[in-house]
Image: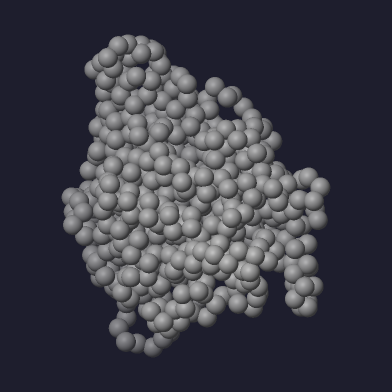
């Protein structure tokens, strides 16, 4: 491990994103998504599934007020496991103000929202938004128990059973999200009220978990706590948070299995038979350092890998880094969709077996693609290799952005690569697939997760070490590093050409490193007079930088016809069109129904796609590049018998119009396909 190549994200205060693409996405989050989600968290969006998130904090805060007022006379609620999911009132206005509703992890939706607010405020001060967030933080802090414990599910239902079901009940996950939120808000605003609350909860957990005699040897049933505690360690310098995170990582999957132990204890207490679970769903089937294949719930797996990568970097832990590399390879070489989505099966929202990547039945949860971007960035922080940057870019531009409507007011949880709306409506196997984005979800993990990653996209674009500024993603804007400002002008994601101009009052010696995108043949980064070295798909330019130094970025971008490995059964005989980092798809709105009859004409296209036209278009008012490719349609026999004798197929010419995958389903309901038959 060469720690000279280690880097960490550039502080968002030092970044200004100004290009027309990402600036617009970030402004959408700031002006539309954050306010909309605040309404959703307060159950005020008509026709949307209630969140209960703020309701639960209010119920917990009320209970805490009562606890303080009554002192020793206070009788805490006693947990009833059969009420883990309290029946939801048909009409939210009929909700009981003292009852917890929704999933056990509803608190995390607030945390993701506040995290997005923190990132946004770092780059765009907004006193009204900050005042709203401060008020929300006051409420959340009022819900905290005086021990530091802060999880409304148990506070309201009975803390006597706190930490008795780590496998499923998400308290440590909620801690993780709270920490991420608190750090972001602290970094964005300088305010530490939430940070103090998060530290108190983390301290409470630290006092109860660990290898020491008398402490619990458990770990999160849903990872995130690990990377969050490591971030808290980096911000506070408190060694205990690093120790706790590493304990959680290394204890996972140890024998005896903790989830089994706690499950047996619970069964005994409740007088029920013990049912073992499949611990690979939780990545707890064996110690993380021994894991070879990425398995189980996809978001959990990606968050785990992200925590492992953070620990590998902070502890210079070669063995852990090797495990990260293995799991990375297993993910991107065998289990990732061409859209950068992961999680091939709805069964457990999980990774399936290698090369099982169904298009229509895909799960590809928005959160899982976000987790893949987290993992990729952390690997880049350790060893800058273009492969990580390529995957991070792919996930962000395609599955992550597809998760949010162009107006920011509806969301996908599941991101299929093929949709037949009738199947979604009538076939229970497709129940998880929605043909249009939803206003909200009972389990709304994805929408605020998209908000937090989009508003912090700058931290994925640039990382820095003492000597080097790395540009991983090409966002237009500027970034400050060691007394210089690097101003990037790009046409991404529609054009690969751009430039970077240095602004510096005095000469500064350092290295500027730029990713050479894998989608570009003959990518070039050049600056006359600077020492140039290409390593692992990055171009390193070193020397004394002066005001006006200009770096030419030339990343030829062309439409590409892509095919999948033959082991991906669903994609055999099919191809997908991509251009730069953007994956394209066919939509009914442009191509009519029955997309399964469409054929790309590879003989006309050729490998170089010279016959694909690149057109300027608009989807939902947003300027995009469309692709028009020569194609055909299979002419079907009309209204005949279900089965007839074979006859040579007849095709008619039909040009095919492709739109960027992230823009699909912004013009109403219809069929969609990423993979199109070529034979
Ligand atoms: O369990 C918390 C979140 O809810 C997961 O990350 C998502 O997959 C959804 O199940
Ligand atoms: Zn999600």
Disc tally is 0
Left or right side of 138 for 22: left
The residue located at (52%, 72%) in the rendering is 100
User: In the picture provided, is 443 more to the left or to the right than 148?
Assistant: left
Using the image, determine if residue 672 lies above or below residue 272.
Answer: above
The spot of residue 214 in percent (x, y) is 80, 51
User: Looking at the rendering, which quadrant does residue 667 occupy?
Assistant: bottom left
Image coordinates of residue 15 in percent, x first then y, are 33, 34
In percent of width and height, residue 99 lies at 51, 75
Quadrant the N terminus occupies: top right
Residues 275 and 111: in front is 111
Q: Quadrant of residue 596?
A: bottom left
Residue in the foreground of this view, choosing between 260 and 235: 235
Expressed as whole percent of the image width and height from the top left, the position of residue 629 reads 26, 55
Displayed quadrant of residue 268: bottom right
One can see residue 589 in this view: yes
């Amino acid at each position: 491990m060469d720690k000279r190549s280690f880097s960490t994200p550039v502080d968002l205060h030092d970044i200004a994103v100004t290009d027309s693409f990402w600036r617009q996405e970030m402004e959408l989050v700031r002006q539309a998504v954050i306010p909309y989600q605040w309404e959703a968290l307060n159950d005020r969006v008509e026709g949307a599934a209630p969140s209960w998130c703020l309701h639960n904090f209010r119920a917990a805060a009320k209970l805490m007020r009562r606890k303080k007022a009554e002192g020793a006379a206070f009788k805490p609620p006693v947990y009833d496991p059969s009420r883990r999911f309290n029946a939801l009132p048909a009409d939210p206005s009929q909700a009981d103000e003292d009852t917890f509703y929704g999933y056990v992890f509803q608190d995390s939706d607030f945390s993701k929202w506040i995290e997005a607010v923190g990132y946004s405020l770092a780059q765009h001060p907004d006193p009204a938004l900050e005042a709203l967030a401060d008020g929300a933080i006051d409420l959340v802090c009022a819900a905290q128990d005086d021990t530091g414990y802060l999880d409304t599910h148990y506070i309201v239902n009975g803390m006597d059973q706190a930490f008795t079901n780590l496998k499923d009940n998400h308290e440590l996950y909620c801690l993780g999200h709270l920490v991420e939120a608190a750090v972001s808000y602290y970094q964005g605003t300088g305010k530490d009220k939430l940070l103090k609350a998060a530290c108190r909860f983390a301290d409470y957990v630290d006092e109860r978990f660990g290898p020491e005699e008398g402490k619990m040897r458990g770990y999160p049933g849903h990872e995130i706590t690990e990377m969050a505690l490591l971030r808290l360690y980096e911000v506070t310098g408190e060694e205990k948070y690093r120790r706790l995170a590493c304990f959680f990582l290394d204890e996972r999957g140890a024998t005896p299995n903790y989830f089994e132990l706690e499950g047996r204890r619970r069964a005994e207490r409740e007088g029920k038979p013990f049912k073992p679970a499949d611990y690979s769903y939780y990545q707890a089937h064996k110690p993380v350092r021994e894991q070879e294949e990425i398995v189980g719930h996809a978001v959990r797996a990606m968050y785990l890998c992200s925590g492992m990568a953070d620990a590998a970097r902070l502890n210079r832990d070669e063995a852990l880094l090797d495990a990260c590399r293995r799991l990375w390879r297993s993910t991107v070489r065998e289990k990732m969709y061409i859209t950068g989505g992961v999680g091939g099966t709805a069964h457990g929202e999980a990774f399936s077996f290698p090369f099982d990547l169904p298009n229509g039945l895909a799960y590809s949860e928005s959160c899982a693609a976000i987790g893949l971007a987290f993992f990729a960035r952390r690997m880049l922080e350790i060893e800058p290799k273009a492969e990580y940057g390529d995957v991070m870019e792919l996930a962000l531009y395609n599955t992550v952005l597809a998760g949010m409507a162009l107006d920011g007011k509806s969301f996908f949880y599941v991101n299929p690569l093929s949709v037949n709306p009738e199947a979604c409506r009538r076939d229970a196997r497709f129940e998880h697939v929605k043909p249009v984005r939803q206003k909200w979800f009972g389990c709304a993990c994805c929408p605020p997760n998209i908000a937090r990653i989009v508003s912090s996209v700058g931290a994925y674009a640039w990382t820095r070490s003492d000597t080097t500024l790395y540009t991983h993603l090409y966002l237009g804007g500027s970034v400050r590093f060691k007394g210089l400002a690097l101003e990037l002008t790009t046409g991404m994601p529609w054009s690969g050409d751009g430039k970077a101009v240095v602004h510096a009052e005095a000469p500064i010696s350092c290295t500027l490193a730029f990713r050479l995108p894998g989608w570009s043949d003959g990518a070039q980064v050049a600056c006359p007079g600077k020492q140039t070295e290409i390593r692992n798909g990055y171009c390193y330019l070193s020397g004394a930088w002066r005001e006006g130094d200009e770096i030419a970025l030339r990343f030829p971008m062309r439409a590409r016809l892509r095919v999948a490995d033959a082991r991906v059964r669903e994609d055999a005989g099919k191809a997908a069109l991509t251009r730069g980092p953007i994956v394209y798809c066919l939509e009914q709105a442009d191509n009519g129904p029955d997309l399964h009859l469409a054929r790309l004409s590879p003989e006309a296209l050729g490998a170089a796609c010279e016959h694909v036209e690149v057109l300027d278009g608009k989807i939902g008012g947003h300027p995009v590049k469309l692709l028009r490719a020569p194609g055909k349609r299979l002419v079907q026999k009309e209204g005949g018998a279900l089965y007839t004798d074979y006859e040579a197929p007849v095709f008619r010419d039909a040009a095919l119009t492709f739109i960027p995958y992230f823009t699909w389903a912004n013009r109403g309901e219809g069929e969609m396909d990423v993979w199109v038959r070529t034979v």
